[in-house]
Amino acid sequence: MSTVATIHSDALGPRSADGLQLVVFEGPDRGRAVRLDAPRTVGTDTACDLVLTDDRVSRRHVRVGPGADGGISVEDLESKNGTQLEGSRVERAHVGVGATLKVGRTFLRVAPLSQPLVVTPTQERRFGEMVAESLTMREVFAVLALAARTDVHVLLEGETGVGKELAARGVHLASPRREGPFVTVDCSALPPSLIESALFGHVRGAFTGAAAARDGAFVRASGGTLFLDELDSAPPDTQTRLLRAIERRRVQPVGGDDEREVDIRLIAASRRDLSALVASGELRADLFYRLSVMRIRIPPLRERREDVAPTAREILIRQGMADPGPIAGPNLDRLFAHDWPGNARELRNVLERARVLSPEATSFGELGVSLAPIHEPGGLRVRGDLPFHDAKREVLDAFERAYVEDLIARHEGNLTAAARAAGLDRKSLRRLAQKHGLSAPRSEGPAR
């Protein structure tokens, strides 16, 4: 059974009700869910299977569970404010996967459960531009090859530098869409004011500097694949428009009235655990389930050190070293001893620096491989062997963790007092603590 991939859709096989769940994707209890393998009662009563805190929801509001023909049965329990299905009030209904219910101010969706994908590691040591010897990565290759044969949306997760874009490009090139365009948008590299223009395009005069109309990534990728990197950086309003564009297969440029049809296969990626962001309210649950039809985790290089040597060989060949010779000896020992926080991208930069410092070297063994940071002032570790944005993010992450850890300790776990002292709101401070895996601060009790 795969440890690297899960599926959320019947696109790769039929689903029954015991493979579904009812998820709160909008409302005060966003992120809560209950399995639909049996009739489930939703309401504010603590005896309900899915307990909500929405004050417009009745104590026993609606019952949802397995119905005929593998579908889902919905029955309103004479609630005060009623149950709505796709905008219309219903007493009884029979629905399928993706159905949206509204109870009070809360929106519920029938969504597939995340289920491990059973695969056998491929015998191939290459997928696109990625190479590997480890069983784990050959399992990833098998899943990527399976994804390429379908047109389902894919969500790639993994640390910075593991090769998420290479994986996405490999899926595209192995798919029936290979003759179409492959378009990449890095959501983290765009200011919030420009991200919608980059995705959906704009008309002339839509904003200051829009001297001419421009097609967005959705239109440019039509007929091919759109790769959205660092999806979690998209602002909430953009997430809403993104979901609408995916579901309708139509986009409206910023400042324009006319819509354009698009035909894309979407692959999204993030270095963060998006399911945790859904639970914290930072990512729309409906967008997450729409994109994570097939969810694939690419493991970091430190978890598969047997891939260091073949990856180093591939990098050197691509850098112009015709025959790197044996990837062995003291240089390989140095590479093996490193933890690779920057993963394959860091390995590429280390080897590129080694080639610059060893211009006469014609093989791996002749390179002067060094893994020491370029500069480390005052205890601040600055990684000159990483791209600027990755090195900056690493420094900022280290600062955030150290600051929040010390701040909470100084206030003995009192989150409200800590947030006040830092000039942050309580929710932002809690999010920072969760982001860096710090222990949850103690509760301060009810507000007075």
Image (cartoon, rainbow, N blue to C red):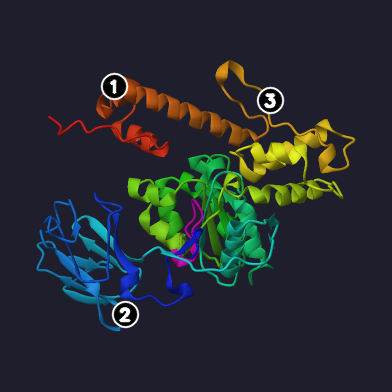
Query: Would residue 255 be counted in the magenta stretch?
Result: yes
- Which amino acid does the dot numbered 2 rest on? Gly
The residue singled out by tag 2 in the image is 70
Q: Residue 411, percent across and down?
A: 29, 21
Query: Cα distance, mark 3 to mark 1?
Result: 36 Å
Classed neighbour count for the residue bearing mark 1: other residues with Cα under 10 Å, few (<14), some (14–19), many (≥20): some
Cβ–Cβ below 8 Å for labels 1 and 2? Answer: no
Q: What x and y, as percent, mark residue 120?
A: 57, 68
Instruction: Pick whichever, 365 or 40, lies toward us.
Output: 365
Precedes in sequence: disc 3 or disc 1: 3
Judge from the rendering whether residue 192 lies leftward or rightward of residue 331; answer left or right.
Answer: left
Looking at numbered disc 1 in the image, what kind of residue is underneath it?
His
Q: Is residue 434 left or right of residue 53?
A: right
Q: Residue at x 69, y 39 (%)?
A: 335
Tag of residue 39: none
Question: Residue 391's spot in the image, x, y percent?
Answer: 60, 32
Q: Nearer the viewer, mark 3 or mark 2?
A: 3
Separation of marks 1 and 2 at Cα, in angstroms: 53 Å
Q: Which residue is mark 1?
A: 411
Residue 94 at x, y percent in the picture: 25, 77
Task: Give me the residue at 31% from left, 74% from top.
Answer: 17
